Amino acid sequence: MMFSNKAEFKKALQSYAIKTKRTLKFIKNDKVRVYANCGNPDCEWTMHASKVKGEETFQINLLRDHHSCPKIFEVKNVKTNWIKDKYLQKFKSDLKRCVKGFRVDIINELRMNVSRHQAYRTKKVALKELEGSPQWQYSKLWDYLDEIRKTNPMSTMIVGIEQIDGEERFSRFYVCFGALKTRFKAGCRPIIRVDGCHLKGPNGGILLTTIGVDPNNCLYPIAYAVVNKECRETWEWFLIVLKNDLNITREYEYTFMSDKQKGLMQAFEEVFPRCDHRFCVRHLHNNFKQAGFRGLAFKNALWNAVKACTVGEWKMRMQEMKILSQQAFDWFNDKPVVQWTRSHFINIVWVLGRRVVVVGSGNCQETQDATILPPLPLEEDPMDEPTVDPCITQQESQVAAAPVYKKGPSVYQQVQQSNQHLTLQPIVQIRALPPMMGSQGLPVFSNTSRAPQGNRATIIRDGGEKFLDLSQISPLDD
């Protein structure tokens, strides 16, 4: 029997050992000779092979193909490369194949044992052959950038290079796809989640990501970056590039959410000093537990304080936590309340294309793209105008123009479910002369002055009209 070269001969000998379930031991193994015996010293199996003179061909000269020993479950000739060659196609069809399931398949098919570490090494070698090594992948980075430039216009790609001992080394990498960037500016909510994680592998590094929220309240990827370490300098670089990329000029309209990673808070103060910054409550609860406050009682007390909508309710919830544990109450002293409780948030709410900003728990509100009527002159009578409120007319037109989804998104479904529990109430509209305006364009109210004589208002209730003389109404008490 002849083989084209030594490697082919040894691979065939290895397959023979696995098929017969016996371990073969090499007595001589050099460039021109291969002598092998059975691993059991009492067995008479032996084989001699040598290289044909002047060729690479190997020929078997002696073979005693008879085993006098029993089969074994532990065959030492099962090597990583042999298993990889046999199951490479299965790995190619399922790159995320788990090691545990792969090891079970080998044991059931070959009827012999394969250690967990050997199965892990086999998968690692197979993936390296199919996908290439991390070093090889980094060498293809420039080709990757060219492909993005061709297939996704308007994308932003930045590669940082360092000079170390006269050689160029990879330092950092930033990508923001043009399609994601355009759609985020067009219709996503002004909420950006910033996070980072460590990369596994021989090269390591940190992956920095930004995630937004689309109009359907689903996650929306924005940009990502790979840096060598996580610190204030890398976070500032990432946020500055992101700010320029998304053209963020009105910082106060955006809300950033993070878990206060290393150097991130200082980077926010430098790059986005006027933005609203919120802290992830899940990470806050994890830190709360690590401080020694475990159990369902502390968890419920924390979430009750987080979900409080007013300052008064938040104070009440914190008093409940203080009764539960004074140490737990003191743990929040160095935590800015504007970053983790709803009662102190600067909320930005979008409703039918109109932005309503609620500052803290006060009554300061700002409405954009809403109909604002100027005050009427004193000589004009408001009763000469129709009693239909233009704000209500505009709202009705917006609702009528809104699309109706046959299989609507989650937000539309939530609105429809909420409407089923609503009860209709009669509409009351009061039209009267506007109050006296101050120097700054704000209405001036006084609880000591009465309405001018002859001032009238119209009450529309259930389709009927009724006139009301405002001069007969006493001023409100404090």
Image: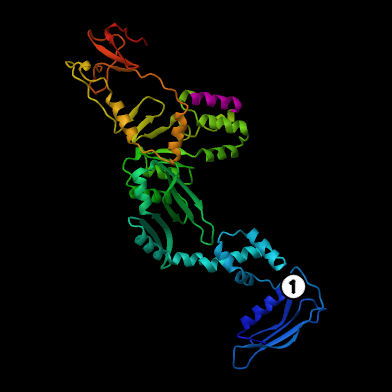
Depicted 22 relative to depicted 449: above or below: below
Quarter of the view holding residue 213: top left
294 or 119, which lies in front? 119
> Is 247 situated left or right of 102 in this image?
left
Q: Position of residue 135 (x, y in %)?
A: 49, 66
Quadrant containing the N terminus in the rendered view: bottom right
Depicted 268 relative to depicted 169: above or below: above
* Magenta-drawn stretch, dominant element (helix, strand or loop): helix
Quarter of the view holding residue 452: top left
Picture residue at 34% right of the left edge, 28% below the top = 365
Q: Is residue 70 magenta?
A: no
> Is 18 situated left or right of 476 in this image?
right
Picture residue at 42% right of the left edge, 22% below the top = 424
Q: Position of residue 291 (x, y in %)?
A: 59, 37
Q: Is residue 316 magenta?
A: yes
Picture residue at 43% right of the left edge, 37% below the top = 412
Q: Position of residue 402 (x, y in %)?
A: 35, 36
226 or 389, which lies in front? 389
Q: Secondary structure at mark 1?
A: loop
Depicted 289 relative to depicted 169: above or below: above
> Is 12 situated left or right of 282 in this image?
right
308 or 46, which lies in front? 46
Residue highlighted by disc 1: 21
The stretch in magenta equals 313-325
